[in-house]
Image (spheres, rainbow, N blue to C red):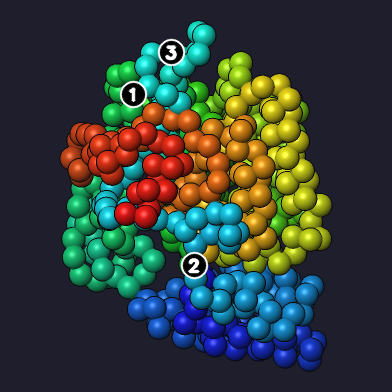
Amino acid sequence: MGDYELCDVCMEGVTLINEFITSQKTFADIKPHAINLCVKVLTKKGYHGDYMCPGIVESYGPGTWFVFVQLSLDPLTVCEKLNYCLPSMGLWKTTGERKVEADYNPHRLVPDRVVPREAGDELSGTEKILRILQLSDIHVDPYYTTGAATDCGLYICCRSQFNGTGSAGQYGNYDCCDIPVRTLDIVLSAIRKLDPAPDFIIYTGDSPPHDVWQESWDSQLKADSLVVQRLNEQLEGFTIYPAIGNHESYPESFYYQPSTAYQALNSKLATLWGSWFNVSADQRESIEISAYYTTLVRPGLRILSFNTDYGYLANFYFLLNDRIPAYREQQQFMKDVLAGARQSNEKVIIIGHVPPGDKGSSVMDYGDFYTDLAVNYSDVIVLHLFGHTHHDEFELVSACFLYLDSEIFLSEGKTDVKLLYSAKDEYGLSDMSPQSWRSLSDR
């Protein structure tokens, strides 16, 4: 998504859809043309579009068709909203700063442990330093096969039925495969042995694999349940605060709250998440409505988890956000939680999946809303945690981050996990203030 070079292809596709809508055609009429266009796009990107596109169109076609029938927008407007016809660049608001990606290209599954506030055993009064561990984008592939092809021309490889070259290792292949369950178990085992242990864990979503051309509701929900089961078994006794990822639904990246299928997903998530932390009755209701919630971690510190699918470019339903009451309700909920936290003298950690400043992934309105939120409540928000990009990176917004250090861990494809680096040491930061990160980005 968000590929400027595909502007012409995007407008061609929208023009074709509009022509079919005007002539009162159905999705069945446009389906062969959609497959041909899909093959054209994926072949340009170096994939076997002829293999994947029938399944992709079957999954994504009806929802996409529904959206365009509702709107019938002109091609340039649609493609600009999808960031296909705008040059890519950092955060949307001028109050924000450009996203900076670290030099590392780590071939690993990364848990990121963050220690908030200032150094020392105590922060103020009797408050202790909190050690927070973040997990994100696990993407477990239950069909991963050791020795299978690692270069197969598909979104993911490393399955016995996919032909190609290369040989999948026992614990994964970062470039073109998702991970086997055994690798997840190794990482979770290492987390369990951390000393000192994390006070709690944040999971910013995405459990299913990237086999988008052969997904179903059943496969997605099984993957969601598998990860919850594995974390429950390996991390018994830990409190885990989750956020919904774009892969949790079917088809992945699509999320349309008014649909009964997505309401069923929300209900399923409320049950699964209820095994990770104490979900109050009112917050279970908000999860069931639209997969967002807030909960008090301890006196003075609150988690706010929200659904970023509304602001994800690949979710074409975002074009209907203005017609979805739950979308505005979530935004009001976030404002109310932050205002209430300010009044109660609480600090808030915001967690989500899709980063608001990633123009390749985030909708303009979403980036604007979140930047305003971060700036207006910079005295309340102490940490923003997102996933999705599969990179070690940070974004700067005019807000106050009060934490000690960020430690990145490496799984080497063996049976151990080790500390890779400390952000302060690696980047020469005097502290973790916005000023220090700005200095780093300038350097």
Q: Position of residue 347 (x, y in %)?
A: 60, 27
Circle nearer the N terminus (2, 1): 2
Count of numbered labels shown in the rendering = 3
Q: Which residue is mark 1?
A: 192
Amino acid under disc 2: Met
Q: To which quarter of the image does residue 195 belong? A: top left
147 horizontally vs 131: left or right: left
Q: Nearer the viewer, residue 259 or 359?
A: 359
Q: Which residue is mark 3?
A: 122
User: Label 2 to label 1, Cα distance in Å?
Assistant: 39 Å
Regarding residue 225, the answer to whether it shows in the image is: no
Q: To which quarter of the image does residue 312 belong? A: bottom right
Q: Nearer the viewer, residue 105 or 140?
A: 105
Determine whether 340 is above or below 408 in the image. above
Regarding residue 336, the answer to whether it shows in the image is: yes
Amino acid under disc 1: Arg
For the residues carrying marks 2 and 1, which lies nearer the camera in this image? 2
Mark 1 neighbour density, 10 Å: few (under 14) some (14–19) many (20 or more): some
For the residues carrying marks 1 and 3, which lies nearer the camera in this image? 3
Q: Which residue is mark 2?
A: 89
